[in-house]
Image: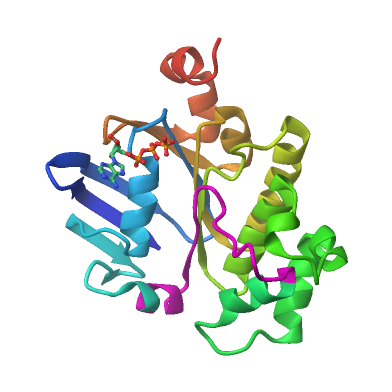
Amino acid sequence: MLQCRNLGAAYGDIVALRGIDLEVHAGEAVALIGVNGAGKTTLLRAISGLLPTTGELAYDGRPLDTLPIQRRVKAGIAHVPEGRRIFPGLTVKENLEVGSSVRGRGTSDDFERVYDLFPRLKERIGQLGWSLSGGEQQMLAIGRALMARPRLLLLDEPSLGLAPRLAEEVYARIACINEGGMTVLLVEQNTVLALGVANRGYVIENGSIVLTDTAEALRLHPRVRDAYLGR
Ligand code: ATP
């Protein structure tokens, strides 16, 4: 579904990604693991069109790098950014409505799908974004992305800033979304959670992929165990 070949990206003189080869197949959940500043966020931003890239980037076998952001969303790529970025002055329902705006108005089926996944959002339907807890804001950010009816969901550190129990709850929902057939590419510092839902993973260090394997094999890999699982 998604192919990166020798992908590069930079912020001015600062090279953030170099020589990235990465694939995501339809139906997979793929984790990108790395420490602060490794380039995880930059890779998601490159895929969703927030940053110019070099090398090849293809989606459904067609070049993606020439498509502007809105066209990428319409093609089925939805990005849940780091730090959630929900609209604090809009209600839960209005935030969700923004997610569907790329296609027109959200249908009742769209809303129900999100509320089935996150019943807590339904209970807080008229509440303003700023007043939600961190976990609820993360659920809303994911729900808002789902309103665009994506085929590929990009998730940037969905566990960031959440208490362990809430982070697990959010990850259980991500697993449900993937089991429902949606392809997921997620970026995480919490390697245990990420490899818990992923089928495969990539380890990124200093802007380059240094290791890729099945989630199971990565969990057992000495480099991952020492550097990312703290064992
Ligand atoms: P984190 O978990 O902290 O978000 P990350 O793995 O997502 O880390 P990136 O945010 O992708 O890392 O950053 C990769 C590199 O690019 C870092 O060296 C960072 O300092 C640099 N960088 C990121 N954003 C910018 C920017 N807007 N301007 C300049 N350099 C940037």
Relative to 214, 179 lies left or right: right
Which residue is the extreme one toward the right?
123
Give x and y (percent) for residue 147.
62, 74
Nearer to us in this view, 56 or 158: 158
Nearer to us in this view, 29 or 193: 193
Give x and y (percent) for residue 157.
53, 42
Q: Which residues are magenta?
A: 71-92
In this view, 206 is above or below 21 = above
Instruction: Give the residue at x 21% y 50%.
Output: 7
Quadrant assignment, res 108: bottom right
Q: Quadrant of the image for the N terminus?
A: bottom left
Q: Does residue 91 show up magenta in the picture?
A: yes
Q: Regarding ligand 1, which quadrant of the image does it lie in? A: top left
Give x and y (percent) for residue 114.
73, 68
In this view, 231 is above or below 11 = above
Quadrant assignment, res 122: bottom right
In this view, 184 is above or below 191 = below
Decide if residue 176 is in sight here.
no
Instruction: Give the residue at x 56% y 42%.
Output: 198
Relative to 168, 61 lies left or right: left
Give x and y (percent) for residue 142.
62, 59
Nearer to us in this view, 52 or 1: 52
Instruction: Give the residue at x 54% y 57%.
Output: 85
Instruction: Give the residue at x 80% y 72%.
Output: 126
Q: Does residue 195 show up magenta in the picture?
A: no
Relative to 41, 83 lies left or right: right
Which residue is the extreme one toward the front?
89
Nearer to us in this view, 218 or 70: 70
Which residue is the extreme one toward the left?
13
